[in-house]
Image (cartoon, rainbow, N blue to C red):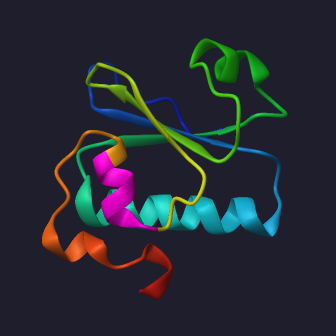
């Protein structure tokens, strides 16, 4: 898991399943999205196999899932997380015009 976020800062939590190549690509895509569009957000990476209690607490039933923990209300996006616009909209955040490009096309 990533380092603990600073209390009160905006927080995203990414749930992955293990250390597969797909999980690695998802982590890379979400880090790029955060760096490009949400630099004020902390990002925690959670492996469902190592911390199933966090998935249960956040009501996550599939991986990969990205959760906007703070600010509330909690929002979740599951599945393909490479489409920045779709992810930002799913999290209830503004999607800048340039976010329409897929994160894997950088």
Position of 20 with respect to 87 (left or right) is right
Near-viewer residue (100 or 10): 100
Residue shown at the point (51%, 59%) measured from the top left: 81
The magenta segment is 83-89
Question: Horizontal and vertical percent for residue 90?
Answer: 36, 44
Above or below, 60 relative to 93: above
Q: Is residue 88 magenta?
A: yes
Question: Horizontal and vertical percent for residue 69?
Answer: 40, 26
Which image quarter is the N terminus in?
top right
Position of 18 with respect to 92 (left or right) is right
Which image quarter is the C terminus in?
bottom left
Residue shown at the point (15%, 72%) measured from the top left: 97
Question: Horizontal and vertical percent for residue 74?
Answer: 38, 23
Above or below, 3 relative to 26: above
Which SS does the magenta portion mostly show?
helix
Position of 105 with respect to 54 (left or right) is left
Above or below, 16 relative to 95: above
Above or below, 54 relative to 19: above
Number of callouts: 0
Question: Horizontal and vertical percent for residue 52?
Answer: 77, 23
Near-viewer residue (84 or 1): 84
Q: Is residue 82 magenta?
A: no
Residue shown at the point (84%, 34%) measured from the top left: 49
Residue shown at the point (26%, 52%) measured from the top left: 38
């Amino acid at each position: 898991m990533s380092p603990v976020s600073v209390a009160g800062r905006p927080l995203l939590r990414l749930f992955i399943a293990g250390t597969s190549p797909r999980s690695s690509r998802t982590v890379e895509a979400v880090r790029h999205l955060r760096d490009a569009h949400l630099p004020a957000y902390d990002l925690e990476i959670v492996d469902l196999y190592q911390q199933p209690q966090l998935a249960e607490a956040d009501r996550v039933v599939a991986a990969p899932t990205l959760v906007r923990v703070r600010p509330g209300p909690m929002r979740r996006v599951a599945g393909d997380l490479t489409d920045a616009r779709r992810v930002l909209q799913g999290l209830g955040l503004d999607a800048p015009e340039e976010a329409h490009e897929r994160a894997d096309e950088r």
